[in-house]
Image: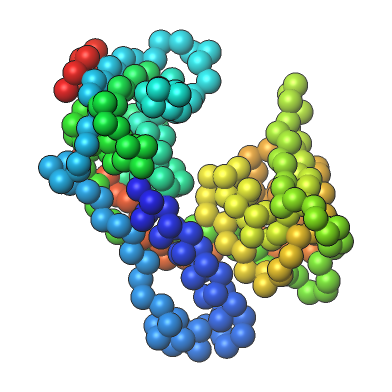
Amino acid sequence: MQGISSAWAVHRTKLHVRCHLIGKFGAVGALILALVLFRPLSFAQPTPPSSISGRFFSVRIVPNVNALTIPAIFNTPEDRLIVQGASVLALIARAYEVPMFTVQGGPQWIQQNYLYDIEAVPPPAFIPSNGAQMMQALLADRFQLQLHTEIREIETWVLELSEGALLASPAEAGQANRIRLFRPRDGVRQASISGNASMAELGRTLENYFAMPVIDATGIDGLYNISLSGFESDDPASFAAVLQEQLGISMTLRLMPAELLVISRIEHPRLDNDRD
């Protein structure tokens, strides 16, 4: 749902400003200013199944039995929804267009214990912009999914400029805002990051990599040549040490408020039905 994903982007910006206020005015002053300037983040409320317009014409759900399948969720040129070896948590995040870490609650099996293959055929008059709502309807109909929103404090990595200058040179004019993260291979645990990126883009890359919220509070604009290496894969603490040493940016873990999608109800799906 576009409203939810847009709200998450706005919330990242608000957290950025709140971090800046704390640095400038202290915690008490920042709290007063935040109460004046900000209202709580509000995602679009999860849509009840009865009010969702548009459903897939046919849906087939089967357990994934191929352990070698790479999880995938995509649409074919004919607008069919194809799911291969995906968890229910991944399906919910895709349907509501949010990072998986913003979906909270529910039983353990929604994460990786049960993986599914799904093929869903849209109606003849399918409108692509309705795809997310149709996925929401599928989850409500077949998994009995019910959601609500809650504001909770969650652990968030905050990027800030350390004392001294940024240890990176500006990117040349015309270079793309593109950064790549190289995961370790062949048993080597160390990973690396390189490319031209803004601090905000670096934060988004880390957010996807570590599956945790990352807020850019550096106050640094523009693109920079970034090259980081020698950190342990999937270990934020190891990366924080490398980031401090090689880029002059601190990365600290703090509790920050966020509005989350919380699972109120979910059940194992009905399987092998060709039509709802």
What residue sits 79% from the left and 64% below the top? Answer: 248
- 71 or 121, which lies in front? 121
Place of residue 222 in the rendered image (x, y in percent of width and height, measured from the top left):
74, 65
- 94 or 101, which lies in front? 94
What residue sits 60% from the left and 43% below the top? Answer: 209
Whether residue 264 is situated above or below residue 243 in the rendered picture: above
Whether residue 90 is situated above or below residue 235 in the rendered picture: above
What residue sits 44% from the left and 87% below the top? Answer: 32
What residue sits 40% from the left and 41% below the top? Answer: 93
- Which quadrant of the view contains residue 150? bottom left
Report whether residue 253 is seen.
no
- Which quadrant of the view contains residue 96? top left
Q: Furthest-top residue in view?
A: 66
Could you tell whether 64 is left or right of 173 in the image?
left
Query: For the C terminus, which image quadrant?
Result: top left
Coloured how? rainbow
Whether residue 30 is situated above or below residue 170 in the rendered picture: below
Place of residue 227 in the rendered image (x, y in percent of width and height, measured from the top left):
82, 49
